[in-house]
Amino acid sequence: MHRRCVLAGRLPLGCAKYLFYSAACLIRRPRVGSNETDLHENSNGLNSDLRLGLNRGRKSSWPHRPPLLGASMKLYLLRALAAIGTCLVSNGAMAADIYSPMTPEARQTTTESGWTFTFAPYFWAAGLSGELGQFGLPAVDVDASFSDIFDHLDFGAMAMGEARNGPYSIFGDVMYTKISGQAGTPRGILATDAELKSETFAGMLGAGYSVFEDNSARLEIVGGLRVWSVESELSFSGGILDGRSRSDGATWVDGLAGLRGTYSLTPEIYLTGWGFIGAGGADLDWDVAATIGYRFSDTISAVAGYRALGVDYSDDGFVFDTVQQGPILGLVVRF
């Protein structure tokens, strides 16, 4: 099989020899008025040159010398064009097998079963705004920056994962935060201090199917479920309510659907993002993000971007109508 040299701007050797011979026949066609002897001398000289330059030390595979007449030259030109077409068609069929460093999957390790796996812990510096209502109290407006939340953050963990096989994917996203705060009461009669602890969990499991994919981009439709759980505890110390506490919380599930996409700008730099929307236990649940990534190696990448997530849930006096948004940083590990 010929080398795939059409892609490098050259034709296979056999095609090149045939084209060179045909072109030489056309270029050295006889002048008007030449006699039969001149024709044979010119043609013999041409055949000698070709054999010496292209088939040195090998048995000639050239066709018999044609008479250099107008009809013969047209015939050789047609043969030359046919040779070009044959070479291009046969080598063009191989082009699909050429490795392209722009293909996102080329940067992932593939198991024998065809699956690739990705794990991405991330840090989301999100602020919080909206309405919160718990413990039977009226809902209050909240507008807290990330620095305000970080001052009261006890623990936080966030990570994404994906398993992919061809156009099919299974992915997950988990977020957990635990915050706490303490404050004194104005008069200290009912209690001298009040402490609030709150834990929030959001976990999504979904599946996707690629509807478009080429050497540099992929777009897939996705659907899944997101589970929310919010638990809060209010406790008192000192005063009449010393040692007493009360808990409130809610758990619900929302169905979401949307799109995810990836586009490679270079073999190392790529863009990725998603957009989901849905409802269920909540009246509205949505999630959008856009990031840019850099591949350090076939297994390690880093991403940075911006994410916004909103949910509107209320039931029996419990209100969780919030929007969280802020910059996001992540480390992507493929194995």
Image (cartoon, rainbow, N blue to C red):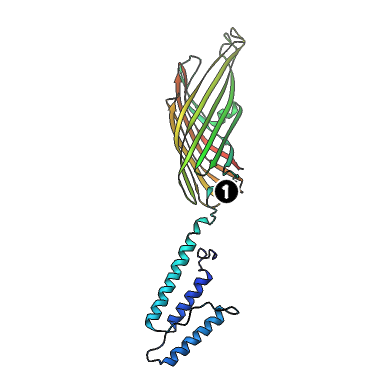
Tally of numbered discs: 1
Frontmost residue, 142 versus 20? 20
Q: Residue furthest top?
A: 240
Quarter of the image for the N terminus: give it.
bottom right
Residue at x 51%, y 51% (from the top left corner): 265
Local secondary structure at mark 1: helix
Pinpoint residue 329: horizontal percent, then vertical percent: 57, 39
Residue on which the image places disc 1:
107
Q: Quadrant of residue 300?
A: top right
Disc 1 residue crowd, few under 14, some 14–19, many 20+, Cα 10 Å: some
Residue at x 55%, y 26% (from the top left corner): 201
Pinpoint residue 36: horizontal percent, then vertical percent: 42, 91
Residue at x 50%, y 73% (from the top left corner): 16
Above-or-below relation of 96 to 208: below
Pinpoint residue 27: horizontal percent, then vertical percent: 44, 82
Frontmost residue, 66 versus 159? 66
Frontmost residue, 28 versus 287? 28
Frontmost residue, 126 versus 30? 30
Above-or-below relation of 173 to 38: above
Pinpoint residue 50: horizontal percent, then vertical percent: 52, 81
Quarter of the image for the C terminus: give it.
top right
Amino acid type at mark 1: Arg
Above-or-below relation of 198 to 44: above
